[in-house]
Image (tube, rainbow, N blue to C red):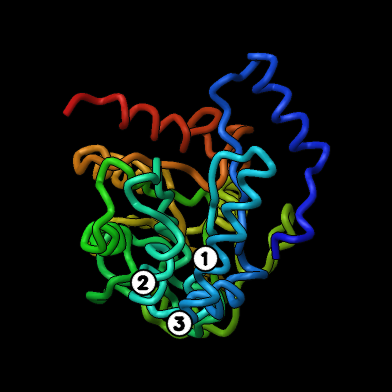
Amino acid sequence: MFGSFCVSATLDKLKERRRDNSNPNLKIFLSVGGPADSATISTIARDASKSHAFARAAARTLRSSGLDGLDIIYQQKAGLEPAKFFSFIQRVLVTRLVDIVNVAAYDFAGTDRKSISHPSPTTLGPVGLPQIYNMESFLDLWLKRGFQKSKLVVGLPFYGHGWLLDDSTNHDLGSAARQWITASAYTSEQGTWPYFEICERIKQDTATNFFDSSIQASYAYTDAWWIGYDDVKTIRTKTNWARLHGFGVYAWDVSQDDFRNVCGGGKNPLLNAIKEEMNKSQ
């Protein structure tokens, strides 16, 4: 995986920005995994010898390429049990040497499901039932595994996952769905719309937007489609929770915010909501 790693022109430019002091605090990470390679991560994580080999190869690459850290992107739908994933992380990383752990508290419910499920609930599970697949429970798992609260950073999604409804009158969590929502007009990704596109579609299709207090997260729906996502209220709820509990937050990703003010709440409302909540006093 790492033997053929080559330094791209972009990486060279980033390093140059750090060397010429235009951005001396810039940190550059090697990112592995993601949608295409989460199954490979699962295979490695289930085998202790492969995990150690992975760690050694990653360390060599980071040192030889002058990078600052390793970003492992794992999507739960690849099927690895949470306990095995945590064991893998602990084999790969020495926790006392880790500066931050970005916890992707989203994609808990993929569009491969046949029922309406929120991809990033704050509390309860994707269908509003007591499960670990929500932001609060997921962070608690990391703490129970020995990771320091001050090093955990909560991921907030700037996109949503959606489905086409099986029955136009049933749009509650857990209701049947036919298939994932139509592909994004901007990213061409099936089942997923960026936040700014969700705003467009809510206006265009006169959709109903609803903040579900049981999961502390929002969704929008029409007679034809349903999408779960983080709107400004959800982002404020999550950021406030993270701040009060001593966690940091990050966004995935900023290019999907409403930078054109489609929603009518000003440019970049999600980023601004994070900033405002994080700047509040305890």
Given residues 36 and 21, the one toward you in this image is: 21
Which residue is label 1 attached to? Answer: 74
Please give the name of the residue rendered at 46% of the width and 38% of the height, measured from the top-left corner: 270
At label 1, the amino acid type is Tyr
Which residue is label 3 attached to? Answer: 115
Which residue is label 2 attached to? Answer: 126
Q: CA distance from mark 1 to mark 3?
A: 23 Å
User: Mark 2 vs mark 3: which is more N-terminal?
Assistant: 3
Q: CA distance from mark 2 to mark 1?
A: 18 Å
Please give the name of the residue rendered at 25% of the width and 48% of the height, measured from the top-left corner: 148
22 lies left or right of 173: right
Q: Label 2: few (<14), some or many (≥20) within 10 Å?
A: many
Q: Secondary structure at mark 3?
A: loop
Q: Position of residue 57 (x, y in %)?
A: 62, 60
Q: Position of residue 113 (x, y in %)?
A: 50, 82
Image quadrant in which the C terminus is located: top left
186 lies left or right of 198: right
